[in-house]
Image: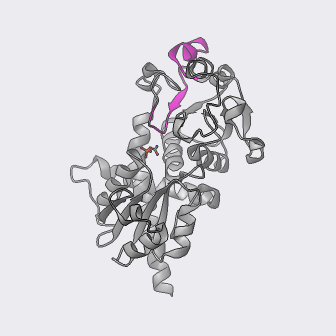
């Protein structure tokens, strides 16, 4: 297929064919990271800026590594120590950065909708690196790539997303991506952590972790986002949450689920949503997710840069 989008805002916007095209493009880039010289000239002469208004380890570094493996020049911007802390708006800041000749802006922001607003106000490409509770498209894409790699398919699998669904942009992007590619999605957690009417997105709701462990092919264990819980804890205690919804080796053994694939987007609250022996065990693909993140972000940067080039040539 011909890729025509110069921005990546969310998986809600993409067709199944477009999502599959990103996954297929990432497959071709995965090999680059195994070479002794891990570089291809695909984005030579282009500049990618990471604009992170919220903390990040994986996404920020992964986009930098991806851009450098494509031979792009990279710049990093964070809120602290810049004129944003003096009251400059995000759009004014972005326009000033764009005037320096930037080709792609990778934006993480606390506000849902910030990447779309940015895309409407700048001429360069914008890639969403996580916006509030809205979407985290490259996280879902790397999750899809990992499922496809370890299970050989996505269509027909049952994938459980466990935890704080209400506050999770990772859950939202995964739901869009998984359902579009034919997976059955079960969202799992206490009722206080699952938005009302989420079934409208085509998912099954489950409040029983034993049932989820018994039935799912893949469990994606979300971090409890203590920093996003403004109205107090949505469960009686952390110990209670762990007992009811934590994934432990005992739970896996009880249901004889040694074929279960265990995922986590990171950062992990060890011993809360995921027992350390499971996080580090043979069924965990957490580091494979991180590895695939570089290939997915290479694919996304490469595709949006190509689409921007085509739109420049045709205008
Ligand atoms: N998974 C994820 O987005 O991690 P970071 O917050 O470290 O980027």
Figure quadrant of residue 144: top right
Which colour scheme appears in the figure? one colour
Q: Is residue 254 magenta?
A: yes
Q: Residue furthest bottom?
A: 315
Q: Looking at the image, which is closer to me, 272 or 17? A: 272
Relative placement, left or right, of 149 versus 31 is right
Which quadrant of the figure contains the N terminus? Answer: bottom right
Q: Residue at x 61, y 36 (%)?
A: 164
Q: Residue at x 47, y 66 (%)?
A: 90
Figure quadrant of residue 76: bottom left
- Rendering quadrant holding ligand 1: top left
Q: Looking at the image, which is closer to me, 264 or 38? A: 264
Number of numbered tags placed on the structure image: 0
Q: Is residue 137 magenta?
A: no
Above or below residue 313? Residue 181 is above
Q: x, y percentage for residue 196?
A: 76, 41
The part of the chain drawn in magenta is 246-268
């Amino acid at each position: 297929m011909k890729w025509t989008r110069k921005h990546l805002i969310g998986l809600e916007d993409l067709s199944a064919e477009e999502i599959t095209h990103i996954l297929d493009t990432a497959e071709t880039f995965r090999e680059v990271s195994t070479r002794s010289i891990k570089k291809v000239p695909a984005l030579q002469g282009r500049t990618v800026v990471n604009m992170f208004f919220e903390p990040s380890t994986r996404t920020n570094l992964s986009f930098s590594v991806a851009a450098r493996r494509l031979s792009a020049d990279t710049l990093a911007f964070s809120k602290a120590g810049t004129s944003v802390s003096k009251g400059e708006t995000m759009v004014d800041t972005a326009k000033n950065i764009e005037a320096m000749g930037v080709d792609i802006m990778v934006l993480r922001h606390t506000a849902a909708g910030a990447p779309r607003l940015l895309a409407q106000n700048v001429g360069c490409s914008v890639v969403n690196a996580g916006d509030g509770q809205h979407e985290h498209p490259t996280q879902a894409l790397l999750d899809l790539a990992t499922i496809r790699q370890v299970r050989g398919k996505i269509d027909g699998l049952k994938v459980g997303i466990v935890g704080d669904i209400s506050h999770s942009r990772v859950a939202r992007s995964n739901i869009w991506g998984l359902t579009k590619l034919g997976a059955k999605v079960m969202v799992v957690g206490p009722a206080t952590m699952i938005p009302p009417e989420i079934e409208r997105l085509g998912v099954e709701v489950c409040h029983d972790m034993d049932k989820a462990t018994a039935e799912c092919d893949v469990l994606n264990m979300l971090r409890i986002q203590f920093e996003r819980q403004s109205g107090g804890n949505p469960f009686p205690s952390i110990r209670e949450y762990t007992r009811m919804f934590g994934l432990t080796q005992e739970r896996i053994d009880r249901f004889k689920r040694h074929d279960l694939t265990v995922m986590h987007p990171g950062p992990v609250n060890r011993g809360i949503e995921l027992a350390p022996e499971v996080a580090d065990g043979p069924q965990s693909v957490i580091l494979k997710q991180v590895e695939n993140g570089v290939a997915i972000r290479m694919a996304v940067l490469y595709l949006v840069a190509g689409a921007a080039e085509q739109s420049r040539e045709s205008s």
